[in-house]
Image (tube, helix red, strand yellow):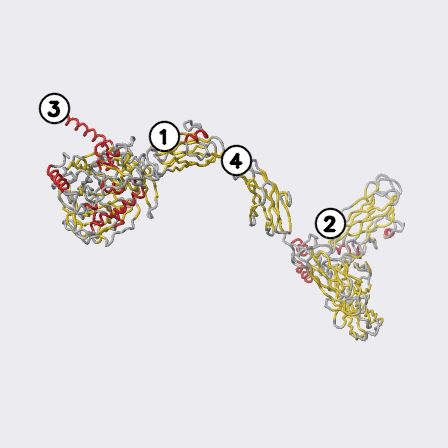
Amino acid sequence: MNTVNNMQSVRILIVVILIGLIPPWSSNEAMAWNGEPWGDMSRVEIVSRADQMIDSTWSPLNTIYNFGYESTYHYFYAGTTYTGEAYSQCPIQDTWAEFYQEVTTTSGGTTYYGNDCSGFVSICWKLGDRYNTTMFESDATSSGGYVDSLGPIGSCATAGLIIGDACVRSGDHIILYLESASGGRMRSMEQTPWTTQRKYWYWSSLDGAPYLDGYRPIRRRLLAGETLSVSLTAQPASGTAPLNVNLTADVSGTASGTINYSFWWNCNDLSTSVSYVSSVCGDPWNSTYGAKFDGIWDDPKTVNHIYSSPGTYSAKVIAERGSAPPAENRFTITVNPPPDTTPPTVAITSPTSNPTYSTSSSPLSIGGTASDNVGVTQVTWSNNRGGSGTCSGTTSWSAIGITLYSGQNVITVTAWDAANNTATDTLTVTYTPPDTTPPTVTITNPTSNPTYLTSNSTISIGGTASDNIGVTQVTWSNDRGGSGTCSGTTSWSASGIALYTGQNVITVTGWDASNNTATDILTVTYTQQTTYTLSLTSADSGSIRVNGALHSLPWSELFAAGANVTLEAVADTGWQFAQWNGDLSGSTNPTSILMNGNKNIWIDFIQLWHYLHVNSSPITGVEIESTHWGSSTNYTMAAPEIGIIDLNAPQYVGSGESRMCFNGWTGSVTSSNTYIEFTMNEDKTITANYVSDPEISDWHSPTETGVPYNEWHDPEKAYSTNNQYTWRTYSDLGRFSSEQSYKNFSFNIYPGSIINGIEVQVEGYIDSSIDNAIRITLFGEGGGTSSQKSIAFGTSETTETYGSPSDLWGIDWFPDDFTNANFGVNVVGYAGNSIAKQYVDHIQVKVYYTTLEGDLDGDGAVNFTDYAIFADNWMDDTCCDPDWCGGTDFDHSGSVDMLNLAAFARYWLEGI
Amino acid sequence: MSKKTTISIVIILVLFVANEAQAAKDGYILKRLARLEYGSGKDQIGLLDVPDIPRSGPESFWVNDKGEIYICDTVNASIKQFSPDGKFLNEYPMGFNCSDLAVGEEGNLFVLDRSRRLLHQFTKDEKQAAVQLIDRQLMERADILSFSGNKLVMISVEQEEHEIGEFKDGKFLLLERTNSQGKKGIMGRKQTRFLTIKTHSKRGEIGILGKEGEIQKKITLPVEQVASIVFLGQDDKGNFYIQVERTKAEGIGINLSVYCLDSEGSVDSVIENIPNNYLVWTAKLLQVNANGDIYQVLPIREGVEINVWMRSKSK
């Protein structure tokens, strides 16, 4: 107070004096509270009393004024509503009822209605006396009395205040503790000018100066029903061994003061007696069994313990505090063994142990086995196509009702253990849905119609059937009696089915593997009335149209007696109808027949023929081949109307000077090819034409001698071979001499031909073996003389040939050289060293030549007609034997090219 | 000057220098701006200290961003204004006992009359502009006036802001009815809301709230034996300040400290051992301004101290 200025101190002193002078026995004194019978009370009652004084409203009947700061009184105005009992610093304190009675009846003026802070607490605590703050402090720090101290001055923040407790500062102020507000500030219930109220306190204002002006936490004694409870929690509450657990005990209740905690790591006893539980579960001071803490303020209190072994433990705590009965609580801790990492096993054994399975049945049932080192908890299944579920059983499990989908279904079965380890097995099920598509069946024989009339007592039927999968069998049944299985499936038949007079419904049923069926029905009317069979046949090519319907032959069917059936014979191509035979005659077509009995008719058709006349010109007797009849000459052949006939004429006929060359077909068929094909659709006359095409002459003998030269006797005897000789005797030894010529050999070489070679043949001998020879030379009209050739005879007659097919004897020859009568052979003899005779039987000449190139039409001249043929084949490169492109490919190279043109030009206009 | 007096002065100086040095090390420098005498004079603060009457003194104060200090001179039923260096500036007679106050930067003065549940608004010319009756339920739970952006709010013990009025068209208008529906958390200067939590284990946490009042980030202070934890405010740099009361190890007495956290929530500095020998009940213990300076109006037995922990330039 020594820092308060003097003036203020004086004013306060005056106020205190004034307060002291106010007579406590004022008009309101009789109603003042001055203590109540002391005894138990609850905290609820404390708060209730405080709330009434804080929250009640009042309005003075007349304006009053109570104690105010310094010399100023505080006014409460009539008609104004106030909340909370008024502050009045007066030894006589009012309860709410007293205060309300006073203010609502007051005549106004200076009053002391209400209470002050210590009066407020005294009333709330229902003390036996009205205490001021000094008395509260004094009582709290001494034994007995109305209040206990909860701690030293400055310990309100740590005293563990409970609602209804108080903090008092001697000579100053006292407040009731209501609650701890957000952020930790304290909320009070108190009487502080000018009305009772609740306020928020910083702890600094209570405990900030503990040794100077701090507050002391205090508690009313005889608080009825002081309670204590404790909760125990574990963190974590479960886990894998070793498990490090924090056990936290949290006490609550009205009990106050320090706390004794007794923890046991594992104790199921329910007792709250520490000594008893210690005897049962062990001494908590021994860390083997638990932990113990006495006289501490910690709330909550946490201890740590490591549970080494798997198992279930019941941690226990007993809390002791104040006068409240001890409280206990337990908490179950589950310590699990190390995690199970071993997966189970599972196997599908039903419907198969194989990985695949096929079925047409759905849903599917499966089953199997599973195992695990700890235990299988469940087995589930799933279908990759959809659907899943839990199987019944574990180590032996099954599942039913698994819906299958068409195609492949992968059924996965999973076995689980408690640690969620899994194992799977799969079964791939191929599901083929049942076949619901029925087959089809059709009766086609004896008719496709639904009805059939017959007079036969049995019937044969037949037809077809089909199915999306396959027809397994076809059966028949007659509603009149009888049934059977048909032969065949997709094409089926049944014979000998007995018929009964009247209507027989023949039902044919087609079946598939899924027993789907289809039926066709033929209603057969079997009548006893007369029917006749019309049978038609033919050995030829044709068919029959019966009542307008065309049928192949043979054909037969029943007709009712008296039916008039129209028949028309229809000949195949190349044939024509000839006549009816059997039960029908004549050649009328179409015609009809009355069915007055069984009718058997056969029909004659005749084949149409044509004649082929084949010959050759100008020569006859050329063998012309045909694949139909071989080779023949000048013949007439009959051929079917529709037939492909081929003919093949030889390219050459004859040889030597009489050789003929094929020159084309004329008549019904024209062609330059030796091989022809044609259709015999009419009579045909075809001629193979040939032209002369010699290539070598015959041996020609001379018909005339030329120079008669001395010693050759009878030279004309060399004209022919007849063993009549012309001869000579050599006397002029050592030289050739005695020349004899022969000429007029009657050659006829085709004009323009190319002379290729000449051979001279001499037949003769010598009468002794001497050195001899004859020398032959050729000469022609132009007087040219060929080179000479010599040959020696032997003593036996021999025929010696001089020259060759390619020996031109040293000069160029032309065809007319040989046709000229002056062409001849000159023979000269020779004797070496003795005289001898030479005999010549005959002398012949043969000419080798090639027919004139360019004379393509064979007219003996290379002219414009030939040019036209040549031009027509020009540049044709497909020439081949035998035609060689119409003769223009002279060198047979395969093409008519520049070389052929050069050859053609060479003989241009030859023969004209 | 006697030898004893000289020794005392030397000791006081040594202690003062030591205190300054410790504050500087923490990034703050403590300055005692004034020690006001008790009394009814213009530059004095009233104290009612009569046996068995609740001791009463200055119940609250306000510091604006200029550093001017306004003190609820509750006993003298007035507001006292002091300069940033602690010099008396002005007195505003109220005619009622001030419970708390807030001063807008534009000069509006808002004063709470708890006993009558009235909020008084005074304009800069000291004229009373409006009086608002505070909802009883709100008054029961809220006791602190503050600004939240451009709104005047009352802060409840549940740390909810209840709007009382707001600036409109350059004028401040009180709502016709106080808003008993509060908004969770206390708004800082950076449009962030804060919530302080004292845990069951007597630790302190700070929740940074989202738009819907949900805790988006939680910061745990490195303290134990927390008795109370209060959000003081946020400075212009985004640092925010937490007032913490802790029980002492021996269970007697309270430590008062302030934790300064940067905008990321990391503890930047701590001001420990703030004197807290409050002689009377006060609505607030400390206040932080835009610079991050922490002010205290401490009614002790010897008078009313105005202390400030100035944030060093580097911070």
Front in this rendered view, residue A87 or B297: A87
- Could you tell me the amino acid type at mark 3? Lys
Which one is in front in this view, the residue at disc 3 or the one at disc 2?
3
Front in this rendered view, residue B31 or A209: A209
Residue bearing the label numbered 1: A294
| Residue A118 visible in rendering | yes
The lab-note entry on whether marks 4 and 3 share a chain reads no
Residue bearing the label numbered 4: A340
The alpha-carbon separation of the residues under discs 3 and 2 comes to: 180 Å
Q: Position of residue B158 (x, y in %)?
A: 30, 45
- Could you tell me the amino acid type at mark 4? Asp
Q: Chain of mark 4?
A: A
Res B3 label? 3
Q: Secondary structure at mark 2?
A: loop
The alpha-carbon separation of the residues under discs 1 and 4 comes to: 43 Å
Res A531 label? none
Res A123 quadrant in image: top left
The alpha-carbon separation of the residues under discs 1 and 3 comes to: 53 Å
The alpha-carbon separation of the residues under discs 4 and 2 comes to: 125 Å
Badge 3: residue crowd in 10 Å (few <14, some 14–19, many ≥20)? few
Q: Position of residue A346 (x, y in %)?
A: 59, 40
- Could you tell me the amino acid type at mark 1? Asp
Could you tell me which residue is drawn at 31 percent across and 46 percent down?
Answer: B184
Residue bearing the label numbered 2: A811
Could you tell me which residue is drawn at 82 percent across and 43 percent down?
Answer: A791
Front in this rendered view, residue A794 or A529: A529
